[in-house]
Amino acid sequence: MSLSSYLTLGRSGLRVSPFTLGAMTFGEDFGWGASPEDSARLLSAYVDAGGNSIDTANIYTNGHSEKIIGDWLAARPAQRDRLVIGTKFFGNLHLGDPNGGGVGRKGIIHQLEDSLRRLRTDYVDLYWVHNYSPTTPLEETLRTLDDLVTAGKIRYVVLSDLPAWRVAEASLLAQLRNWVPVTALQLEYSLLERTSEAELIPAAQEFGIGVLPWSPLRNGFLSGKYSSTSAPHGGSRGGLVRPRESDFLVIDEVNKIAASLGVSSAEVALSWVQGRPGVTSTLLGVRSMRQLEANLSALDLELPPADRARLDELSTPVLPFPYFANQHAPALELAGANVDGVRLEPYPTLTASDQRY
């Protein structure tokens, strides 16, 4: 596989690379990102390798990430229409202004205008709702986004970091009102964070929504720098995030599989995520050319079934209610009948003589 092995995003006509270049690391404003010059080189290397999907947000490095991308695009105007540019709204960059962010009509429109100015483009392909407000009617948000599609300022309506019930509500509301449908969903997903499998990923699959996982290396814990016997002091990003004790069982296995295959741990972890059901394009967050090249190498890796099964088993999450109860539903419903070519064992307490009352 390569970056130019494009995949269709949800139930749309849009095709994106299997890896999306994330730009949260663009700019040194927060103390840990890449310089504008290095960010531009990362953009060029990704696009030269066949990549077409770039993701940012208005709040990434307080708008600097968007500006870096905009400056890069301005120097290469012929590239704009060849790329899928996504940015997000919700975060407020205007201190003290209650309408400076959020998902209300006024806030959405001015956030988009600011993003377009920084990106130096007249439209964005994917406009991500970055969170939700319990006090703003969802109808107001979706109708505004539908209007912006009609106006040609955005191409697709997409959601990031929303709970599954809100994703379902938005999808159904858009269908009911004949508004632009929800095309994609961003969520955290990795071998160390699989709770999205309870509701978010099934909801996306049910509604024909493409999934773009972020933090597939779980803050670098799956990059190969960590193990149960040696971990960088202070955890990730200056000690703000630390691996859990239980994570090291998975981390060590990833490192072991990587060594046996002669690849990096990052390649193993990324290959696992990109091969999961429902996933369209995995977001890469990199700060150096070395990291980008190492991550892109995962496109060439197909995990052996035994290794994938081992990782599946070790990383199996404890999912919230009613996931466990729902697992028994087919056995309870079908009572051992053969349906659609599949026969499931009946619920253990049921026998042929049980209908006797």
Image (cartoon, helix red, strand yellow):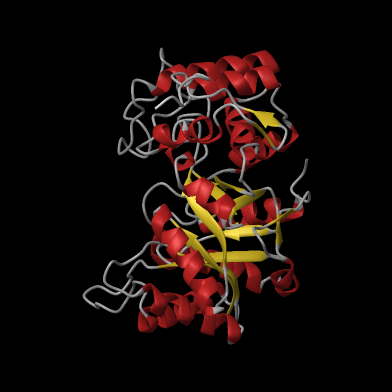
Considering every residue shown, the one lying at the far left of the view is 96
* Location of residue 74 by image quarter: bottom right
> Left of 4 or right of it: where is 64?
left
* Location of residue 8 by image quarter: bottom right
The residue shown at (60%, 52%) is 21
Which quadrant is the N terminus positioned in?
A: top right
Which quadrant is the C terminus positioned in?
A: top left
Is 356 placed above or below 143 here? above
The residue shown at (73%, 33%) is 341
Is 24 placed above or below 312 here? below
Task: Pick whichever, 131 or 325, lies toward us.
Answer: 325
Where residue 42 appears, x then y in whole percent? 62, 51
The residue shown at (57%, 75%) is 180
Task: Pick whichever, 219 or 198, lies toward us.
Answer: 198
> Left of 264 or right of it: where is 88?
left
Q: Is residue 258 visible?
A: no
Where residue 246 appears, x then y in whole percent? 37, 21
Is 235 placed above or below 6 here? above
Where residue 12 appears, x then y in whole percent? 68, 65
Where residue 295 appears, x then y in whole percent? 63, 38
Considering every residue shown, the one lying at the far bottom of the view is 151
Q: Is residue 249 visible?
A: yes
Task: Pick whichever, 297 or 305, lies toward us.
Answer: 305
The residue shown at (32%, 70%) is 92
